[in-house]
Image (cartoon, grey):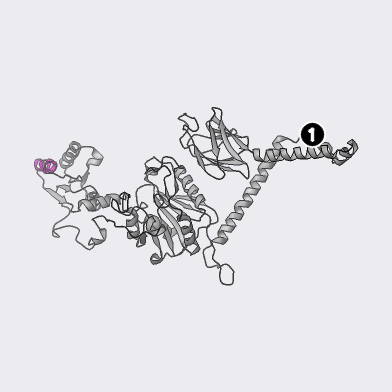
Amino acid sequence: MSCTLVSQTGARISLEDGRPVVLGRSPDTRVTDKKCSRNQVKVVACYADQDVVVTQLGPNPTFLDGVPLGQGLSGTLTDGGTLYLVNQNHPFKLCFDLNLNRTATSTAKKGEKAKDKTQGGSKETQVSANPKRSIKDFFSTSPMKVNWHRTKVKRQRKTEEKLKHLQEMAEKFTPESKDGSSSCSEPTGCLKSSWQQIGNLLLYTAAGVKGSDKIAGFDIDGCIITTKSGKVFPTAPNDWKILYPEIKPRLASLLQNGYKVAFFTNQMGIAKGKLRPEVFKSKVEDVLATLQLAVQVFVASGPGLYRKPVMGMFNYLCDKANDDVTVDLARSFYVGDAAGRPEKWAPGRKKDFSCSDRLFALNIGLRFHTPEEFFLGWKSAPYNLPSFDPRKLDSSGRLYDPPSASLTSSQTEVIVAVGFPASGKSTFFHTHIIPKGYVYVNRDTLGSWQSCVSACQRALKDGRSVAVDNTNPDPESRRRYVDVAKAAGVPCRCFQFSASLEQAKHNNRV
């Protein structure tokens, strides 16, 4: 059996049984309409049911036999049906080829005819051999009723199969006591796969996932999957493959040993508008469908507390997504490829793009492994951590020096900040200075140093003190405000923020 989508322009898209294919504007479909996304739909053929499940990924509507879908919604297309990629344009007809079955049937019929001719027999014998026909045999059944009945039967069968699958998953991942009965004190697990969104966090919980005190955490890109194209970044939603064949059996073994398997991934492209959430969600579901394992997936879709190496995703798992089971960090671990390994850490291997996975595990307090160490058994590779280590900071140190100085003054004055971007200037000013009535002057909001100088002059003219929150790295930039203060006859003080460049880079990442 084979399945093909055929367009009026002659494009033919072959669909393998159960394998997702993403279609859209491309040379393969011969569609150049810009209203059609390059990732317009995902199609999955089911040979057993002789139909195709179509999921719309693009923003403009896809139609199945004239019925519109919607972004993120799915529908079923049966044999002979028509898929309109976008806005009822670019039709593709679905064709299931049953040539093998038809050939076998026709051969059987020919054999029967030959047998009849050989055996002979009178007309009366032949007539009496045929079953008696009723009046219904002379009237054809309505095609609409047949199609409706087939669709209803298929839906019922699919529903039964899904319920059976969910029951098997729940039984598979529910431990049994010694007497064979299920333990009621253990988490029963999730019975239905679902997506949640919590701010910049996307959370997918597959059917069968349950809480555990042992967490086996993994990055996704470069750890569980890699690109089929060999490029650093995927060229299409289906440009991926499982990184190593050892991955699936190793993850299955972890589940059997009572671990909860969770994936943690940064996807900044979603916040930047380069990657649509629906497309990445579909990719996650396809990866888990290939692995056929109950996994929970955490996706940091933007900056902030959920983005690795910040601990937000893991903290959310522990606090709200683990069935109230307390996590034992000593029995848990994390695996990722962003490990700070230098160039040629192994023959032909490039330098790791960052150290965020290793730092993620370090911040949480988890044992860390690279994919090669965990799945392939390689020896530990050398690595480099950032020169700035926040753990070495003295949290009990003084806020400012000298301790005898006063942060603010009852007299009108100008305070000029000096320090790297992300060295803490804005936080300090908004916490300690601005609440005392100082006018806040900042180039990021005003646009230019000339506007900052003008704002400073206006505030001093009104008798108000000023806090200038710019980097002011050189004497020339600072002299502008010193001259304004002198012209107004008020003192000018400099607040130098002592954070190093490495600490500022760390703050900026966080």
Q: Is residue 337 magenta?
A: no
Viewer can see residue 199: no
Q: Tell me if 176 is positioned left or right of 320 in this view.
A: right
> For the residue labelled by badge 1, is the local secondary structure a helix, a strand or a loop?
loop
Q: x, y percentage for residue 92?
A: 56, 32
Residue 150, quarter of the rendered image: top right
Quick one: 344 or 52, which is closer to the camera?
344
**Residue type of the residue flagged with mark 1:** Phe
Q: x, y percentage for residue 243?
A: 43, 51
Q: Which residue does the image show at 81% across and 37% down from the upper left?
A: 137
> Which residue was labeled with disc 1?
139
Q: How many marks?
A: 1
Q: Quadrant of the N terminus?
A: top right
Q: x, y percentage for residue 166?
A: 58, 55
Q: Is residue 482 magenta?
A: yes
The magenta region covers 471-490
Residue at far bottom of view: 179
Position above or below: 138 against 226: above
Q: x, y percentage for residue 14?
A: 55, 37
Residue 148, quarter of the rendered image: top right
Quick one: 201 or 214, which is closer to the camera?
214
Name the main secondary structure of what is drawn in magenta. helix
